[in-house]
Amino acid sequence: MNKDGDTNINIKIGSDAPTFNLKDLDGRVFKNFPNDRYTLVNFWASWCKPCREEAAILNHYNQNYGDKLFVIAINSTNKDNLASVINFQKTYNVTYPILLDRLGEVSKLYKVTSLPTTYIVDDRGKIVEVLYGNLNSNELIDKIKKVTLSR
């Protein structure tokens, strides 16, 4: 939410990415986007087949391009369950932070209506790309490269 708690903010390319406070699986609180690199914010659920397919791509970017791209995954925990999230992390050897949106507030703030939904935020905190729904691996990779790795 923004500083006033307003969830009726504009979410579009070029707008400021809303900030939020969410805990990861270890209970650490994530508060801000890093200002030294781009951030990929992936909204997902463990039961979502395309989300499972994207896990390997997100791992690849986290492991190989972490100096240019910070990857975080926000689990729609209000539509999922914690045991399944933990199992997903283990099954897919997830190396990027998984944040828990237990009440669905951040998903609502980002106007997430389908899973997966991915936002790419630049190093100034601006939204530079929004990827909705079931994208194939090549599309996702191309869009990530377009806005982050080619700069």
Image (cartoon, rainbow, N blue to C red):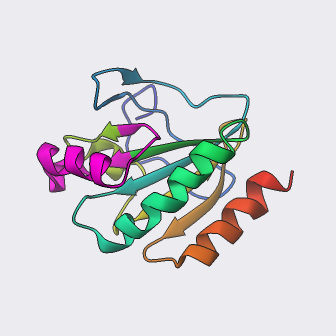
Locate residue 44: give its quadrant.
bottom left
In which quadrant will I find the N terminus? top left
Left or right: 96 with respect to 36? Answer: left
Q: Residue at x 25, y 59 (%)?
A: 46
Relative height, residue 22 to residue 147 (above, below): above
Location of residue 146 in the rendering, given as x and y in whole percent from the top left corner:
77, 63
Left of 64 or right of it: where is 84? left
Residue 46 highlighted magenta (yes or no) = no
Query: In the rendered image of this protein, does residue 100 appear above or below residue 138?
Result: above
Residue furthest to the top: 28
The residue closer to the viewer here, 63 or 141, is: 63
Which residue is more in the foreground, 10 or 123? Answer: 123
- Estimate the x, y position of residue 124 in percent, counting from the top left: 72, 35
- Residue at x-position 28% and y-position 68%: 48
Residue occupying image coordinates x 46% and y 65%: 54
Task: Give the residues in magenta.
Answer: 74-98
Residue 59 makes an appearance in the image: yes
Residue 23 found in image quarter? top left
Q: Could you tell me how many numbered marks the image carries?
A: 0
Give the percent coordinates (x, y) of residue 104.
Answer: 24, 47
Residue 16 in view here: no
Q: Residue at x 35, y 38 (%)?
A: 99
Residue 78 within the segment the image draws in magenta: yes
Foreground of the two, 90 or 65: 90
- Asked if residue 32 is positioned above or below residue 43 in the image, the reply reads above
